[in-house]
């Protein structure tokens, strides 16, 4: 039977850049649903909305983004479902 080693190798801490809300930083109050180019970075290749943990936006602005994307989809500025949209 093999003996277990008493030494534990710890991984070096991963240093990631701090996420920030780009809307708070630049002072954007209103998210325009008619600007489809602005909304594209918040949508993945399948047309789904990216979560807050990936984009780094705050809850308040994530809700506004979701509403703007839904409105843009409704008037056909953005697709509901897409294959390789970007």
Image: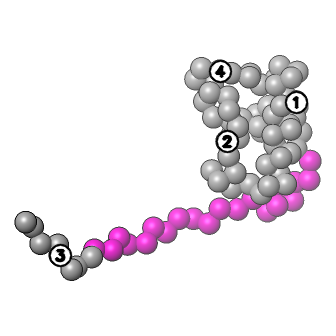
Within the image, what quadrant is residue 81 found in? top right
Tell me how far mark 1 sits from mark 4, CA to CA. 17 Å
Disc 3 crowd rating (10 Å Cα; few below 14, some 14-19, many 20+) is few
User: Does residue 21 belong to the magenta stretch?
Assistant: yes
Find disc 1 in the rendering and name its residue: 71
Find disc 3 in the rendering and name its residue: 5
Secondary structure state at the residue bearing disc 2: loop
Outermost bottom residue = 6
Residue 3 vertical position relative to residue 19 in the rendered view, above or below? below
Please report whichever mark, 3 or 2, sits nearer to the chain's N-terminal start. Answer: 3
Please report whichever mark, 3 or 1, sits nearer to the chain's N-terminal start. Answer: 3
User: Which label sits in the foreground, 3 or 1?
Assistant: 3
* Residue 55 horizontal/vertical position (percent): 67, 50
Find disc 4 in the rendering and name its residue: 82
Tell me how far mark 2 sits from mark 4, CA to CA. 15 Å
Q: Which residues are magenta?
A: 9-30
Please report whichever mark, 2 or 1, sits nearer to the chain's N-terminal start. Answer: 2
Tell me how far mark 2 sits from mark 1, CA to CA. 16 Å
């Amino acid at each position: 039977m093999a003996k277990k080693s008493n030494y534990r190798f710890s991984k070096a801490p991963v240093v990631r850049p701090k996420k920030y809300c780009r809307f708070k930083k630049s002072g954007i109050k209103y998210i325009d649903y008619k600007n489809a180019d602005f909304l594209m970075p918040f949508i993945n290749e399948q047309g789904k909305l990216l979560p807050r943990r990936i984009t780094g936006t705050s809850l308040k602005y994530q809700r506004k983004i979701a509403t703007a994307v839904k409105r843009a989809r409704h008037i056909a500025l953005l697709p509901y479902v897409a294959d390789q949209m970007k």
